[in-house]
């Protein structure tokens, strides 16, 4: 327990956290069906019954996370314009969702698939390829869950607490109501979370500049700060154009390969629901752009984060707003960790249950048995993420998350290509996946766990997003392997119209 607890902010924080906790447990009764909790479709996908509005809040809630609210302004605070790559990335992702995800939903709905690895097995009939996709997704998701804890931990510390006990208590509560209600809990809480985040950000982008002398002054102070430290700036440097663009493109392609985003897609009521969401979800991009501006405002407010860039947003709010609003804002950020963390753990549990337990341990498991296994695994996944934060340095989780983005992108060919054409077979895709994964991992570690790599081409230096380069290697190797292997392996199912 810290000695400088902001009690007013704490009580407001506790009130809203208690509110969503009650909602989380009540969610087990919300839109309940006769199979509630007894089938994996019900626990892990909400009965595949979510309409446009619920899907909009759920997908937005698990795509725009608490760590987004913390990390994007922190990156902008550290490097300036380069940190805004998240904006074009979230613009590019929605055409991808519009074109690809309805086809993936159709493939899953028709055969009763719960995960992307299910779809891959159904299309190619290859257990090794299915396992590769499933393992990659679970491993890439674990540090992502841990980073939600980082976001929650930052605001808990800003309230005046020290130690990890409050964080552990919060995650135990999350684990219990997710176990009870499954995907319905984060879907219901997402309504409150998004409303709170919108209020916080809109108030901040209107009132903070008014307190600091206007946006012109904010940008002037930020520009001077970047010039003084000789790093970053309000505009991209020419050398940053290509890495900025490839980061945006690669991140957009990777975003909906993660199990938490795909879980929201598979839970949708129809393909039309997904298309409507692809049209409306860019509203979150506007919100993200406003959130990013908080990084510049921190300079104008003169906040001191003592080298911890992740503390920028909490420090800014603590400096400029009354205690009750600080508590409200911190609650919004913490609740913003609960929604994606819950969906991520559910997505990982679905993968383990369907693509490992059912495939290798208990092929005859009943739907009720699948649900029981998934519930237990979701608890294990949360504990694993908590251990990462409590035992390992935060930087380790950050590094793993960067690596996770490179890894999850290597599942793109196996998951997506079969939806559009049937040329590739499983052995070729598995070969491409292995080479792409090895290439991306080696480059990331060779660069000190950085997301971009610089190639020296006859004196010309080209810097690219490592994940996108590894994906290119993946596809080229898969194509060569397909030509070399010919018709080996089961012919994939023909793509659906």
Image (spheres, grey):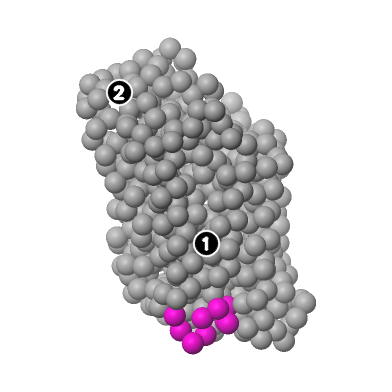
Relative to 15, 129 lies left or right: right
Instruction: Report which residue position mark 1 lands on.
Output: 343
Can residue 114 be spotted in the picture?
A: yes
- Of residue 28 and residue 447, the one placed in the foreground of this image is 28
Residue at 63% from the left image edge and 64% from the top image edge: 378
Report how far apart the C-alphas of labels 2 and 1 lie in the structure. 37 Å
Expressed as whole percent of the image width and height from the top left, the position of residue 435 reads: 70, 54
- Secondary structure at badge 2 equals helix
Query: Which disc, if any, is residue 63?
Result: none
Residue at x-position 25% and y-position 28%: 209
The disc, 2 or 1, on the residue closer to the chain's N-terminal end is 2
For the C terminus, the quadrant is bottom left
Between tags 2 and 1, which lies in front? Answer: 1
Foreground pick, 186 / 222: 186
Disc 2 + disc 1, Cβ < 8 Å = no
Instruction: Say if 494 sits above or below 184 in the image.
Output: below
Q: Is residue 493 visible?
A: no
Q: Quadrant of residue 177?
A: bottom right
Crowd class of label 2 (few under 14; some 14 to 19; many from 20; radius 10 Å): some
User: Is residue 29 within the magenta segment?
Assistant: no
Give the residues in magenta: 32-40
Left or right of 39? Residue 369 is right
- Measured from the top left, where is residue 428 in percent x and y? 68, 66
Q: Which mark is residue 219?
A: 2
């Amino acid at each position: 327990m810290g000695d400088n607890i902001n009690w007013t902010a704490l009580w407001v924080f506790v009130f809203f956290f208690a509110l969503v906790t009650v909602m989380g447990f009540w969610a087990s009764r919300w839109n309940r069906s006769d199979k509630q909790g007894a089938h994996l479709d019900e626990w892990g996908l909400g009965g595949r019954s979510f309409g446009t509005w619920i899907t909009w809040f759920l997908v937005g809630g698990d795509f725009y996370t608490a760590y987004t609210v913390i990390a994007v302004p922190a990156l902008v605070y550290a490097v300036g314009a380069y940190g805004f790559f998240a904006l074009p990335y979230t613009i590019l992702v929605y055409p991808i969702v519009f074109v690809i995800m309805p086809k993936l939903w159709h493939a899953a709905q028709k055969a009763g698939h719960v995960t992307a690895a299910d779809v891959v097995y159904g299309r190619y009939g290859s257990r090794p390829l299915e396992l590769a996709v499933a393992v990659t997704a679970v491993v890439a998701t674990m540090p992502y869950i841990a980073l939600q804890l980082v976001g929650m931990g930052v605001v808990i510390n800003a309230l005046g607490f020290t130690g990890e006990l409050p964080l552990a208590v919060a995650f135990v509560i999350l684990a219990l109501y997710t176990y009870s209600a499954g995907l319905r809990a984060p879907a219901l809480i997402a309504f409150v979370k998004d409303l709170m985040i919108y209020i916080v950000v809109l108030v901040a982008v209107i009132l903070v500049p008014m307190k600091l002398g206007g946006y012109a002054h904010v940008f002037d102070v930020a520009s001077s700060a970047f010039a003084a430290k000789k790093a970053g700036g309000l505009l991209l440097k020419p050398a940053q154009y290509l890495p900025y663009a490839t980061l945006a493109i690669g991140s957009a392609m990777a975003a909906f390969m993660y199990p938490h985003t795909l879980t929201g897609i598979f839970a949708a009521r129809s393909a039309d629901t997904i298309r409507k969401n692809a049209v409306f979800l860019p509203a979150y991009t506007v919100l993200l752009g406003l959130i990013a501006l908080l990084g510049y405002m921190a300079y104008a407010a003169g906040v001191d984060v003592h080298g911890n860039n992740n503390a920028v947003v909490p420090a800014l709010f603590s400096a400029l707003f009354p205690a009750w609003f600080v508590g409200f804002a911190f609650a919004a950020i913490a609740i913003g960790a609960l929604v994606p963390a819950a969906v991520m753990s559910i997505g990982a549990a679905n993968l383990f249950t369907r693509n490992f337990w059912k495939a290798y341990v208990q092929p005859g498991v009943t739907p009720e048995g699948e649900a029981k296994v998934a519930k237990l695994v979701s608890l294990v996944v949360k504990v694993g993420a908590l251990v990462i934060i409590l035992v390992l340095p935060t930087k380790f989780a950050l590094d793993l998350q960067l690596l996770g983005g490179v890894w999850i992108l290597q599942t793109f060919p196996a998951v997506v290509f079969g939806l559009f054409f049937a040329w590739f077979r499983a052995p070729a895709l598995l070969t491409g996946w292995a080479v792409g994964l090895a290439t991306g991992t080696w480059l990331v570690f060779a660069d000190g766990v950085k997301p971009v790599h610089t190639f020296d081409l006859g004196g010309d230096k080209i810097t690219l997003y490592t994940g996108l380069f590894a994906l290119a290697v993946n596809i080229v190797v898969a194509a060569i392997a397909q030509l070399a292997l010919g018709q080996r392996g089961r012919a994939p199912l023909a793509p659906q119209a």
